[in-house]
């Protein structure tokens, strides 16, 4: 611990991810992005194979539950009429939007908007719907974390470059410690892997799920 | 113009960059980051702006002669470190093996926190102080832009991967069109330039400064 002007500040990984004040955020593990029959990502309209990270995330969630670590799910949310999209977003995707053949992904309430079965939420978990890639942007995520005395979040899941980079940047800037287990995160496209990790490591503590689980003594 | 559900949305770069609804943001360009004897110079991290400064000055002049609102954003630190949250204190502690005698760059009110003379603000130009890399995070930048009917901003300066990426991202989330002249930005280290550009491209439009000047002067 660092003692600074009366503040006690976690220093080591073990101190930072103390289950007393750590949440595990599962980002965008949704049917539409990942499962056959899903609409795919907005960029490519194809589903992405993230089978490498599903078992590691499932295991981390299992251990986190045993340790009473809060589980939070964050998911991108859209509506068929795009009423949550602002001018630059409409402008960029206009041709796709007006084409009635373009499927809309992760529409509120649909199967595609649900979290994949392997990682299904349980009663008492927190689910946050977001309208922008940054999970803190005008959502109740900050309020939910603060209300539960959270200092640290571990972020796992899909969309490393799209959602995790801005969420982690925002989170650290408002005072949270962010932790990224590299065996539990995946970009929307593999070509983003290196750039995503580079940006993440500017803000987040890079580790693995094994190290986290060891540190929890589980 | 795109007409979408009663909304009129700028589509072409000409429409996006209309001087009546565009602001130019001068990001950083402070002595401590770029000048001889500045903080970064003394710590061997000085950012070399010899190639980006001449087009930046030309762009600033073009903005002023076309009544494009000019806004300065300055990273601001406080001498007693009270601007730093827990993860930031920890990072500072680790980097300096303690907090004894730690000095920060761009302390409010010092020479190092002033803009370099080539781009210094005129008396009626806004200066926004930010305590975090994201220019919109708990600053009055959004208020100033909205009050002036701004829809788009052009942003130039240093710290592309740290400050410009989250600012263009947050700006887009709020509904602003972000345009970035790629010949007028520097990363804190040149090796970060391409990654920064790739992330900026997710949220905004990258162009050569000459193209912006031509639109404003047309």
Image (spheres, grey):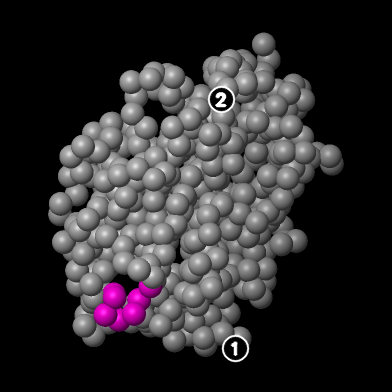
As drawn, A189 above or below A29: above
| Identity of the residue drawn at 61% across and 49% down | B135
| Identity of the residue drawn at 64% across and 64% down | B77
Q: Position of residue B154 (x, y in %)?
A: 60, 32
Residue A65: say if magenta: yes
Disc 1 packing (10 Å; few <14; some 14–19; many ≥20): few
| Identity of the residue drawn at 62% across and 33% down | B153
Q: Quadrant of residue B112?
A: bottom right
Numbered disc 1: secondary structure: loop
As drawn, B26 above or below B21: below
Q: Nearer the viewer, residue B94 or A41?
A: A41
Query: Which numbered tag is attached to residue B209?
Result: 2
Q: Nearer the viewer, residue B169 or B196?
A: B169
List the residue tagged with mark 1.
A6
Numbered disc 2: secondary structure: helix
Q: Is residue A55 left or right of residue B53?
A: left
- Quadrant showing the N terminus of chain B: top right
Which chain does the numbered disc 2 sit on? B
Q: Position of residue B78 (x, y in %)?
A: 67, 68
Q: Nearer the viewer, residue A171 or B102?
A: A171
As drawn, A153 above or below B29: below
Magenta range: A64-70
Which chain does the numbered disc 1 sit on? A
As drawn, B186 above or below A82: below
Residue A177 visible in image: yes
């Amino acid at each position: 611990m660092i003692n600074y002007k009366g503040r006690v500040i976690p220093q080591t990984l073990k101190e930072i991810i103390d289950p007393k004040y750590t949440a595990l955020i599962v980002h965008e593990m949704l049917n539409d992005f990942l499962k056959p029959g899903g609409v795919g990502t907005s960029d490519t309209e194809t589903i992405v194979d993230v089978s490498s990270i599903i078992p590691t995330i499932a295991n981390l969630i299992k251990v986190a539950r045993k340790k009473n670590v809060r589980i939070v799910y964050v998911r991108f949310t859209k509506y068929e009429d795009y009423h949550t999209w602002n001018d630059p977003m409409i402008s960029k995707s206009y041709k796709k939007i007006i084409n009635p053949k373009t499927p809309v992904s992760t529409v509120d309430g649909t199967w595609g908007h649900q979290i994949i079965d392997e990682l299904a939420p349980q009663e008492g978990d927190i689910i946050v719907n977001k309208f922008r890639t940054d999970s803190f942007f005008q959502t109740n995520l900050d309020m939910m974390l603060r209300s539960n005395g959270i200092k640290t979040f571990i972020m796992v899941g899909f969309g490393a470059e799209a959602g995790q980079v801005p969420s982690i940047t925002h989170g650290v800037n408002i005072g949270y410690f962010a932790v990224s287990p590299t065996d539990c995160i995946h970009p929307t496209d593999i070509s983003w892997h290196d750039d995503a990790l580079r940006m993440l490591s500017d803000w987040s503590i890079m580790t693995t799920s094994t190290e986290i689980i060891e540190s929890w003594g589980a | 113009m795109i007409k979408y559900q009663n909304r009129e949305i700028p589509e072409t770069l000409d429409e996006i960059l209309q001087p009546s609804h565009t602001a130019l943001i001068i990001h950083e360009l402070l002595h401590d980051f770029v000048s001889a004897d500045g903080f970064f110079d003394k710590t061997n991290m000085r950012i070399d702006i010899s190639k980006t400064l001449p087009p930046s000055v030309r762009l600033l002049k073009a903005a002023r002669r076309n009544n494009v609102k000019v806004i300065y954003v300055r990273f601001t630190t406080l001498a007693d470190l009270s601007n730093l949250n827990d993860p930031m204190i920890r990072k500072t502690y680790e980097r300096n093996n303690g907090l004894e005698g730690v000095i920060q760059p761009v302390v409010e009110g010092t020479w190092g926190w002033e803009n370099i003379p080539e781009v210094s603000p005129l008396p009626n130009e806004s200066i926004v102080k930010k305590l975090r890399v994201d220019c919109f995070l708990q600053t009055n930048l959004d208020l100033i832009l909205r009050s002036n009917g701004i829809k788009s901003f052009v942003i130039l300066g240093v710290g592309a991967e740290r400050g410009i990426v989250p600012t263009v991202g947050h700006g887009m989330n709020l509904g602003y069109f972000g345009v970035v002249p790629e010949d007028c930005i520097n990363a804190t280290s040149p090796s970060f330039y391409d990654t920064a550009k790739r992330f900026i491209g997710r949220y905004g439009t990258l162009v050569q400064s000459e193209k912006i000047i031509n639109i404003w002067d047309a």
